[in-house]
């Protein structure tokens, strides 16, 4: 059902069973897949919205990046199936560097949260009210970003992490960690999140041991990595690879 006041560009592809509310604007190069609901006053352009998504009133998706180098290059936002964007959420499309912003499946973005250009957001990510992610940020699956948190551009947030209220993240956050503080520092492991995801107890114990080796053993990071990288634990190997691939450097406990 499409409300009679909605404005739909002739290039838009609207699949069956899509609901579009009053005064919504669906602009150029938009695909909205079946089962998705678009609220009133939503603005969408240059975007592909997956199946069974819920976009609440006054959200803006696919709008130009807030990047001074942007010069109307063709780019898009891709939103995965089952994702929810609440009121006043904003997703900017990519710049010429990657040409796309990608948001995973079954994510939940609360009121006024923001995803900037060229980001890669994993599946099942939750961002609370007024949290904001700068350009080129990568967030792993199952991460939780608390309200008013700010993520610096080019930062990587590992899978299964939890970022605390009002935290400013300027360094990469290893998988399964908690981080908190005005400048984000590690604050232990997200054990509650790991258990909720039904990660095996032996995997959780292995991650605990790796965390102690990395940050509590008082040995050099390269030596700590050498010590834990032979672990049979899938989660520990994820942490090792994350650290090895970090370009900004990783946050550590205070």
Image (cartoon, grey):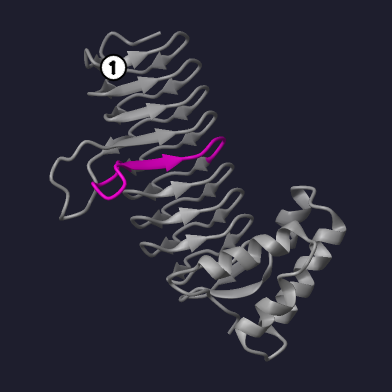
Closest to the observer, 66 or 172: 172
Position of residue 189 measured from the top left corner of the image (x, y, whole percent): 69, 67
Residue sitting farthest toward the left: 71
Closest to the observer, 28 or 184: 28
Residue at point 40%, 37% (across, down): 87
Give the magenta part as a residue range: 92-107
Q: As displayed, is residue 175 above or below residue 126?
A: below
Q: As displayed, is residue 65 above or below residue 61?
A: below
What residue does disc 1 label?
12
Crowdedness near tag 1: few (<14), some (14–19) or many (≥20) residues, C-alpha within 10 Å = some
Position of residue 42 measured from the top left corner of the image (x, y, whole percent): 32, 28
Give the left or right position of residue 7, taking residue 161 as reference: left
Position of the C terminus by quadrant:
bottom right
Position of residue 251 measured from the top left corner of the image (x, y, whole percent): 53, 75
The majority secondary structure of the magenta stretch comes to: loop
State yes or no: residue 42 in magenta.
no
Residue at point 75%, 67% (across, down): 207
Residue at point 45%, 8% (across, down): 16
Q: Is residue 177 visible?
A: no
Position of residue 176 measured from the top left corner of the image (x, y, whole percent): 66, 61
Circle 1 SS class: loop
Closest to the observer, 76 or 55: 76
Q: As displayed, is residue 39 above or below residue 75?
A: above
Q: In which quarter of the image is residue 48?
A: top left
């Amino acid at each position: 059902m499409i409300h009679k006041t909605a404005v739909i560009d002739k290039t838009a592809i609207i699949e069956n069973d899509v609901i579009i509310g009053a005064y919504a604007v669906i602009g150029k190069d938009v695909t909205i897949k079946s089962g998705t609901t678009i609220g009133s006053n939503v603005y969408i352009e240059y975007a592909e919205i997956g199946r069974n998504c819920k976009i609440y009133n006054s959200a803006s998706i696919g709008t130009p990046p807030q990047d001074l180098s942007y010069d109307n290059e063709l780019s898009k936002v891709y939103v995965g199936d089952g994702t929810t964007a609440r009121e006043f959420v904003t997703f900017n499309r990519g710049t010429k560097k990657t040409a796309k912003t990608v948001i995973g499946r079954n994510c939940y973005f609360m009121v006024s949260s923001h995803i900037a250009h060229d980001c890669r957001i994993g599946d099942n990510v939750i961002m609370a009210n007024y949290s904001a992610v700068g350009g080129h940020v990568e967030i792993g699956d199952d991460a939780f970003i608390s309200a008013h948190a700010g993520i610096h551009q080019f930062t990587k947030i590992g899978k299964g992490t939890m970022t605390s209220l009002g935290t400013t993240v300027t360094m990469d956050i290893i998988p399964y960690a908690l981080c908190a503080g005005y400048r984000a520092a590690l604050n232990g492991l997200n054990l509650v999140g790991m258990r909720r995801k039904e990660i095996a107890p032996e995997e959780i114990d292995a991650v605990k041991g790796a965390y102690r080796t990395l940050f509590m053993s008082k040995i050099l990071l390269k030596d700590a990595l050498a010590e834990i990288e032979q672990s049979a634990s899938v989660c520990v190997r994820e942490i090792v690879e994350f650290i090895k691939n970090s370009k900004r450097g990783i946050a550590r406990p205070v």
